Image (cartoon, rainbow, N blue to C red):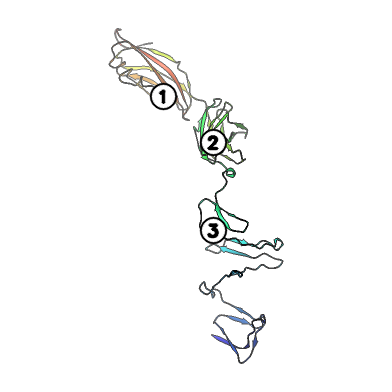
Amino acid sequence: MSKIEVDQVDPQSGSTLTLGTTGNTIIIPAGVTFNASNSTFALPDGSVTTAKLNLISTSSVPGATIKGTSGQTDGYIKLNCEENTHGIKLKAPPHSAAANYTLTFPQTITNGYFLKTDGSGNLSFAAADSSDTAPTITSFLPTTVEGGVNTSVVITGTNYISTPMVEFQSVTDGSIQRAATVAFNSSTQITIGTGTGLVNSTNYYIIVTNNNGQSVRSSTQLSTSASPVWTTASGSLGTVAGNFSGNVATVAASGDTIRYTESTNVLTNSSLANCALDNVTGVISTTDFGGPTTTAQVFQFTLLATDAQGQSTSRPFELTSSFGATGGGQFN
């Protein structure tokens, strides 16, 4: 280290040091430079460590003051990222504001709350006012409805306020139409009636607007398509000899990838009609029509035709068994 003998050090004299041959000693560590012309010491990078930086606040004096530069900028501190290439800044109000206040942070953190202050600058965590919170849409079912038919749709999400407005926005032309009915189930669920204004083969966004003006538009779209249309007339499919084995009848419906199922428990019940229904072709077959029954009966059942969008159309049918005729076979 080097040392400079100082004849007098006057703490009230500003930046002026009187140098002489006797008096106090200033120790200058290695790497520190002293500019006698303006009485400044230049410290090398990294020479002031956390352990050496002991900032103490008192009731009237802050531990550190970040000064502004007149005519240029207000005082601020910057917090950098780990690579020191990005950062955020906390900046003082401008001189014209004549601001002098203290913000005191709360002692604990409350998840999901926001910071608010009282008139004295004391910060605390508070819950957001639900009346100012925008609704969200998580899902809705069904996702496909038939155009021109009033269909019930259940919408789930958050922050619904009784009773929100629900609209449909056409992806094709942006036109808007309201839901026919809206039922408020809870803050996380509403049930709507689509009304008859939706057009088949068109997709729609769903818009939910609370009565405070906050709204949300669904990220997915509600699809519309026509439900399957039965081409086989309802009612009797014919009379079939009891204990007949083979194809009994064929049913058909138009639509997109139709699948056929029975909604009752008669046609495919082994103790009743004892038939099988091909889900793809609509063919009704049997290996022993009427099963254990040896008397003529009328078997009434209901079939569903369901398309690729999950829309179903039901239709009632019946088959009659006969006994006493010779040679077995289908009679219709």
> x and y percent of residue 129 in the render?
57, 46
Q: Tell me: residue 212, above or below residue 152.
A: below
Give SS at disc 1: strand
Residue beneath the point at 56% across and 86% down: 2
Q: Is residue 225 left or right of residue 327?
A: right
Q: CA distance from mark 1 to mark 3?
A: 65 Å
**Residue, disc 2:** 221
Q: Tell me: residue 186, above or below residue 320.
A: below
Viewer-side label of 1, 2: 2
**Residue, disc 3:** 106
Disc 1 vs disc 3: Cβ atoms closer than 8 Å?
no
Q: Tell me: residue 298, above or below residue 150.
A: above
Q: Quadrant of the C terminus?
A: top left
Q: Amino acid at mark 1?
A: Tyr
Res. 55 image quadrant: bottom right
Q: Bin the neighbour count of mark 2 within 10 Å (Cα to Cα): few under 14, some 14-19, many 20 and up.
A: some
Res. 36 image quadrant: bottom right
Q: CA distance from mark 1 to mark 2?
A: 27 Å
Give SS at disc 2: loop
Viewer-side label of 1, 3: 3
Disc 2 vs disc 3: Cβ atoms closer than 8 Å?
no
Q: CA distance from mark 2 to mark 3?
A: 44 Å
Mark number, residue 260: 1
Q: Earlier in the sequence, mark 1 or mark 2?
A: 2
Q: Amino acid at mark 2?
A: Gln
Res. 29 image quadrant: bottom right
Q: Nearer the viewer, residue 125 or 235?
A: 125
Q: Earlier in the sequence, mark 2 or mark 3?
A: 3
